[in-house]
Image: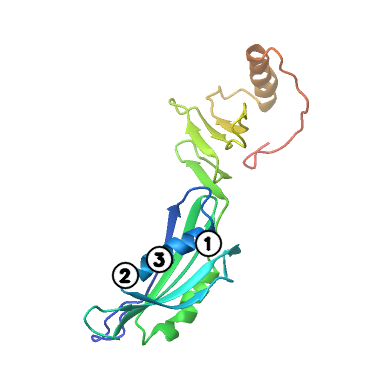
Amino acid sequence: PLQNNSDRFTENLTISVESVTQNTTLDVYTDVTVKLYNATIFDLVESDTTTTLAGNPAHKVIFESRTKGEENEANYKLLQIWTVKGGKAYRITFQADPERYSEILPIAQKMIDSFQISDFLLYENPTIGIKMEYPIDWQEKKAQDGSNVTFISPPQSNFEMYHANVTITTKSLSKNITLDQYGADIFINGLKKNATEFKIVEETPTTIGGNN
């Protein structure tokens, strides 16, 4: 928040996520980013290539922005730290008035240290009351009638014929259908009809969503 009526800048911290090509490395992304800043009104005052962000190798820079036409007058100070993972660049930016930068920095650093990157996304369907996490690089594909959703793994090579996948299916049943009846009489028999080479290789009691 502003400290008084003469306070000219509101300190802030921003998180941004940018899609990059799979072959974009941290060094390549850093080189492009620093060059972009150097081409503007920013002066690089510090660069750290040995830091981490959310446990991943990262690059941290500190810039001073200077107002055009007012020589040597720092407009605000900017800290950025970024990392590249899974085809995405994660960047955190902290901006502050130069006079308050050191005062606010410990708070910003605590926020940065708490930052985490999940390797999973959340699929949620509140209509039928289900949710499930799936890998960030898997593709989500919904059926047009909403009866199922499939999560498809990325190809490992150009010659891969089959993609591993996980499908969630929902089906309305009569209330007197038990779990055993559905498993043996409906699901298993249905698979045998649709797949002539179908064979059960393992059958184990388990739970799903906390239910038997």
Task: Look at the numbered disc 2 and give the secondary structure of its residue.
Answer: loop
Residue sitting nearer the eye, 191 or 162: 162
Give above or below for 144 relative to 23.
above
Residue sitting nearer the eye, 57 or 36: 36
Q: What is the number of the mark on residue 40?
A: 2
What percent of the width, then of the height, locates residue 105? Answer: 46, 80
Mark 2 or mark 1, earlier in chain: 1
Q: Amino acid at mark 2?
A: Thr
> Are there few (<14), some (14-19), or many (20+) residues within 10 Å of tag 3?
few
Residue sitting nearer the eye, 176 or 101: 101
Q: Amino acid at mark 3?
A: Lys
Q: Amino acid at mark 1?
A: Asp
Q: Give the residue drawn at x 54%, y 68%.
A: 114
Q: Give the residue drawn at x 69%, y 12%.
A: 196
Disc 1 marks which residue?
Answer: 27
Q: Choose top left, top right, bottom left or bottom right for residue 166.
A: top right
What percent of the width, then of the height, locates residue 68? Answer: 24, 78
Q: Give the residue drawn at x 32%, y 77%.
A: 10
Disc 3 marks which residue?
Answer: 35
> Viewed as shown, does residue 109 lie left or right of 1?
right
What percent of the width, then of the height, locates residue 125? Answer: 47, 39
Residue sitting nearer the eye, 36 or 53: 36
Q: How is the image coloured?
A: rainbow
What distance separates the C-alpha of mark 2 from that of mark 3?
9 Å
Q: Choose top left, top right, bottom left or bottom right for residue 183.
A: top right
> Are there few (<14), some (14-19), or many (20+) residues within 10 Å of tag 2?
few
Task: Look at the numbered disc 1 and give the secondary structure of its residue.
Answer: helix
Q: Give the residue drawn at x 49%, y 75%.
A: 47
- Asked whether the residues under the numbered discs 2 and 3 touch, taking CB atoms below 8 Å apart as contact, a structural biologist would say no
Give above or below for 181 relative to 60.
above
What distance separates the C-alpha of mark 1 from that of mark 3?
12 Å
Mark 2 or mark 3, earlier in chain: 3
